[in-house]
Image (cartoon, rainbow, N blue to C red):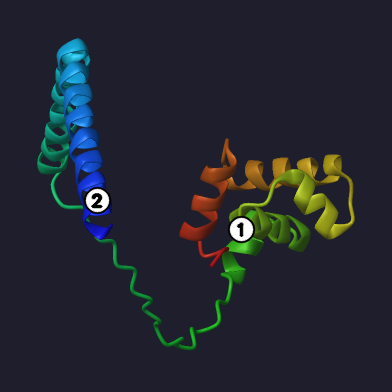
Amino acid sequence: MKRHVLIYGLTGGILIAVLKWTEYRFLVVEHSLEIYGGLVAAMFAVLGIWLGLRLTGAQQKIVVKDVTVPATPAASFVPNEKKIDELGITPRELEILELIARGMSNREIADRLFVSENTVKTHCRHAFDKLGAKRRTQAVQLGKELGLLA
């Protein structure tokens, strides 16, 4: 009985293997163009990836190093009082000139000093006239050169 089962199973296995082999051969013959096309596409994809990695080179590593510099107490700045008196610059004009040097806009200066924007513009114009400046950057540069600003 065992022998019959064994022969029957072996014959069935061989038959299934022959059918699968025939099916595979039919599949390869029938769809050979698609199979070869897929193999060529896979080969070019692998070649493209490899070539792209070779041409771009190794990725650079960016290392950010935090460097802290100990703070040294700076000598306090003392404005040149002689030049201030000589030019006739008022304390408010000097204050507005310092805020301009910090990069503040007229609106920001007005909000900080609790005055209108027109008042700030007036003080700027007077300070610019006294310094002989035409622009904000020129006024700041002249103020630093004359010792009015730090």
Q: Secondary structure at mark 1?
A: loop
Specify whether 81 is left or right of 26: right
- The residue singled out by tag 2 in the image is 4
* Distance between the alpha carbons at the discs numbered 2 and 1: 101 Å
Nearer the observer: mark 2 or 1; the answer is 2
- Residue at image x 77%, y 59%? 92
Query: Residue at horizontal 51%, vertical 51%?
Result: 142
Q: Nearer the viewer, residue 36 or 41?
A: 36
Up the image or down, 59 lies above or below 21; here it is below
Position of residue 98 measured from the top left corner of the image (x, y, whole percent):
64, 60
Question: Image point 46% across, 58% down: which residue?
Answer: 145
**Residue 35 coordinates in the image, percent (x, y):** 19, 20
> Residue beneath label 1, please?
102
The type of residue carrying mark 2 is: His
**Figure check: 42 above or below 64:** above
Q: How many marks?
A: 2
Q: Give neighbour class at mark 2: few <14, some 14-19, many 20+ (Cα, 10 Å).
A: few
Q: Position of residue 69 (x, y in %)?
A: 39, 83
- Is residue 115 shown left or right of residue 128? right
Residue placed most toward the observer, 23 or 130: 23
Asked if disc 2 and disc 1 are in contact, CB closer than 8 Å, the reply is no
Image quarter in which the N terminus is found: bottom left
Can you tell which quarter of the image residue 21 is in? top left
Question: Which residue is at 84% across, 42% downward?
Answer: 117
**SS label for mark 2:** helix
Percent of width and height locating residue 96:
72, 55
Q: Is residue 65 above or below residue 142?
A: below
Question: What residue type is disc 1 on?
Answer: Arg
Foreground of the two, 112 or 79: 112
